[in-house]
Image (spheres, rainbow, N blue to C red):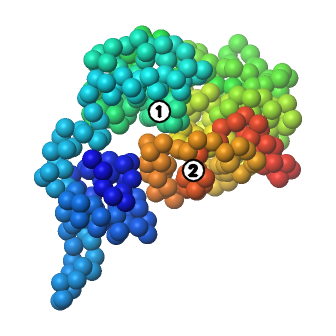
Amino acid sequence: MTVEGVAVEDLRWAIKAQRRYWASIEQRFGHDAREHAVRLAVAGVVDLICTVDEFAHITDILRWQRTSIWDEHQRRNDICQSDDAQLWQTRAQDAARQIAATDPGLAKALIATGPNNPRLPVLVYAAEDLVDGVTHDGPRAFSQTHFRETKTREDSPKVLAEAGAAPETLIALGLRRSPYIGLGGPITIHTAAGNIDLAAVDGPVQFRVDQRSTFDVRLGPSTRLLVIVENLQAAEAVCDTAPDVATVWSAGQPSKHALRLIRRLSTGVAATAIATDADLGGVRIARRILGALASTDDVTVLDAGIAEHPKRKAFGQASRDGLHDATNSADPIADFARACLARGYPVEQEATIRSTLATFIASQE
């Protein structure tokens, strides 16, 4: 079913929760919040709980509550999530086409898995998230997002791996943290067996952070800038063109071991820059890195979208919702998320990120 003047995505959001308070409604619809609320009430989707003046005119909308009719719609998941086998098969085919070049193994599994197979929703959601650039905070977060309970599909990494999904896909989705990190520039790894001076080789050098033996990392004495980069090619460019800059390639979502190493390096520099894709996945990676730093006093979260780039397909609703949530904080991540939302589409080309980094590094000299 539809409501005139209300987008399907907005209708899904409206009925997903039994009640929505005005702050949440206003955050979703902005200046059009009152108009949308009235439209939904007139259509019988929600009941409005309001304050009125002495003439019975509405003064403020406090919240809305889903009507009993639409409670039934939600129960059947007519809009939010249909269990109809044909719908799952159609979604699987669409997702397979979109990720065929990115992850052929997962694309093949989407086509081969039967529409009534209980594993198909895991594959479909994973593929759609991959297309949208959605990154989760682990398997339980993936399960809660798509299946409402954290434990329902906490086995999603196993399901995806057995289906033939690429390891890079699991890392991109936040379902598996990479045990590796890339280091370059004036960084020395100190071990009991000796030291490794990374300034002597072209970086970033891939390093496994979950070592059994104890090690430490230290910066060169005159190092002023630490750059943490999601994209490998961009990290390579920094190492090649700015060898005096300490460079970390995060390999996507950094593991807890990688975050500890990043924190250790951040204690010895005057400034830190974080460069990720300009999408929901990049915002989440940047937020994870920012939270690990020893100090956030002089940290710049770079927006690759400020460089010249081609326009791309607009964000999906899941990405828009995630970016909206990220704007609620009072740190550089909120500004980054707002910039992504204002643009409306992802920016993730290597050349664009390299250009943004080069401009920033030049400004620090």
Task: Give the residue at the far left of this rendering.
Answer: 68
The location of residue 251, given as percent across then percent down, is 62, 27
| 160 on left or right of 264 | left
Which of 157/30 is in front? Answer: 30
Which of the 4 quarters of the picture holds residue 265? top right
- Amino acid under disc 1: Asp
Is residue 32 visible to us here? yes
CB contact under 8 Å: marks 1 and 2: no
The location of residue 86, given as percent across then percent down, is 31, 24
Is residue 156 positioned above or below 272 on the image?
above
Which sits earlier in the primary sequence, circle 1 or circle 2?
1
* Residue at 76% over, 20% down: 196
| 72 on left or right of 283 | left
User: Mark 2: which secondary structure?
Assistant: loop
Residue placed under numbered mark 1 in the picture: 129
Is residue 346 positioned above or below 231 on the image?
below
Residue 344: image tag: 2
Which of 213/71 is in front? Answer: 71
* Residue at 83% over, 27% down: 199
Task: Give the residue at the far bottom of this rendering.
Answer: 54
The location of residue 301, given as percent across then percent down, is 65, 49
Which of the 4 quarters of the picture holds residue 243? top right
* Residue at 46% over, 31% down: 128
- Amino acid under disc 2: Gly
The location of residue 102, given as percent across then percent down, is 58, 22
User: Mark 1: which secondary structure?
Assistant: helix
Circle 1 packing at 10 Å, graded few (<14), some (14-19), many (20+), is many
> Rounded to the nearest whole Å, what is the CA distance between mark 1 and mark 2?
16 Å
Which of 303/95 is in front? Answer: 95
* Residue at 43% over, 17% down: 110
